[in-house]
Image (spheres, rainbow, N blue to C red):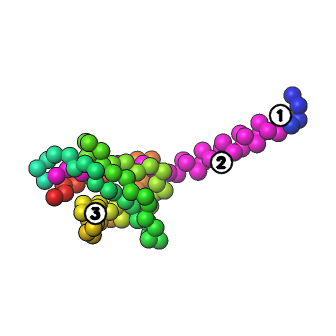
Amino acid sequence: MKPKILLLKIALCGLFLVLAAGLAHAATLRGRLVHQNGYPATAIAVTLVNAQGVRCSPTYTGADGMYYLVNVPPGPYHLEIWIYPKGAPAVFQIQVRDPLTDIAQIAVP
């Protein structure tokens, strides 16, 4: 095998290991929003705010009321549920754990 090809393969393997190690500490957060009548709450924005006050891009609940946030580093967060776009969000303190954190079902108006 040519030395350049061998070095390229070693470098690619190293890059893969670095990327895999970085993703190994990223969790998935999931939960479900329902209206008080029990029906799924759809198209509601959900965001996370970390301890430094950095807010992630919103995700939206689907037709089943489920939301998912992926590649979240484990740690404490504020979960924000934007029920009314121009109002204040409902805020919950949560702890994200690796590899999966399930949030209990939340009823919204």
Q: Nearer the viewer, mark 3 or mark 2?
A: 3
Question: In screen coordinates, is 23 left or right of 105?
Answer: right
Which amino acid type is marked by label 1?
A: Ile
Which amino acid type is marked by label 2?
A: Val
The answer to which of 45 and 28 lies nearer the viewer is 45
Q: CA distance from mark 1 to mark 2?
A: 20 Å
- What residue does disc 2 label? 18
Residue at the (33%, 51%) spot, across then down? 60
Residue at the (25%, 48%) spot, across then down? 42
**Which residue is the extreme one toward the top?**
1
The answer to which of 73 and 64 lies nearer the viewer is 64
- Residue 67, image x and y in percent? 33, 48
Q: In the rendered structure, does residue 23 fall within the stretch colored magenta?
A: yes
- What residue does disc 1 label? 5
Q: Which mark is residue 16?
A: none
Q: Nearer the viewer, mark 1 or mark 2?
A: 1
Which amino acid type is marked by label 3?
A: Pro
**Mark 2 neighbour density, 10 Å: few (under 14) some (14–19) many (20 or more):** few
Q: Are marks 1 and 2 in contact (CB under 8 Å)?
A: no
Residue 32 in sight: no
